Amino acid sequence: MVEAAQVIYHMTPQAVWDAQRNQPSFAPASLATEGFIHCTAEPELLLQVANRFYREIPGTFIIVCIALARLDAELRWELADGHRFPHIYGPLNWEAVERILPFPRQANNSFLLPKELER
């Protein structure tokens, strides 16, 4: 069951991440516009979402790996498009970031899972 996940994933443009590194926490635009930070618990689902919604957006993207045990904000598992997604209802505290991975792309702009997330 995905709710048992220890780590969840958030994808973001590298430039958005870099622009907030001197802030007290990370707060992407979705936190202001939708009230939460979008995440996934399964790497394969992250790849599907990336290629469905972000393929046409240019630029370098990263995957933020978030340790749930260190997350300060409220986490809710919510149903969308037939899947249960973890949503963070508040800014992401830096201490919860386990690691950052590049989110590679092919020549046609489709995303590829990094080797570290392949099963």
Image: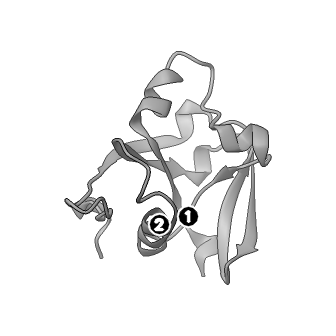
Residue 40 is tagged as: 1
- In this rendering, the answer to whether 94 lies above or below 84 is above
Q: Answer left or right for 33 relative to 22.
A: right
Mark 1 residue crowding within 10 angstroms, few (<14) / some (14–19) / many (20+): many
Asked which quadrant contains residue 72, the reply is top right
Asked which quadrant contains residue 110, the reply is bottom left
Which tag, 2 or 1, sits closer to the chain's start? 1
Three-letter amino acid code of the residue under disc 2 = Leu
Image coords of residue 115 (percent x, y): 22, 63
Q: Along the line of sight, which residue is nearer the eye, 13 or 88?
A: 13
Q: Are marks 2 and 1 in contact (CB under 8 Å)?
A: yes
Mark 2 residue crowding within 10 angstroms, few (<14) / some (14–19) / many (20+): many
- In this rendering, the answer to whether 3 lies above or below 39 is below
Image coords of residue 40 (percent x, y): 56, 64
- In this rendering, the answer to whether 41 lies above or below 69 is below
- In this rendering, the answer to whether 27 lies above or below 110 is above
Give the residue drawn at x 73%, y 67%: 77
Three-letter amino acid code of the residue under disc 1 = Thr
Residue 7 is tagged as: none
Q: Look at the numbered disc 2 and give the secondary structure of its residue.
A: helix
* Colour option used: one colour
Using the numbered discs, state the Cα–Cα distance from disc 2 to disc 1 in whole angstroms: 6 Å
Give the residue drawn at x 73%, y 41%: 31
The residue at which mark 2 appears reads as 46
The image quadrant where one finds the N terminus is bottom right
Give the residue drawn at x 30%, y 76%: 119
Q: Answer left or right for 1 relative to 31.
A: left
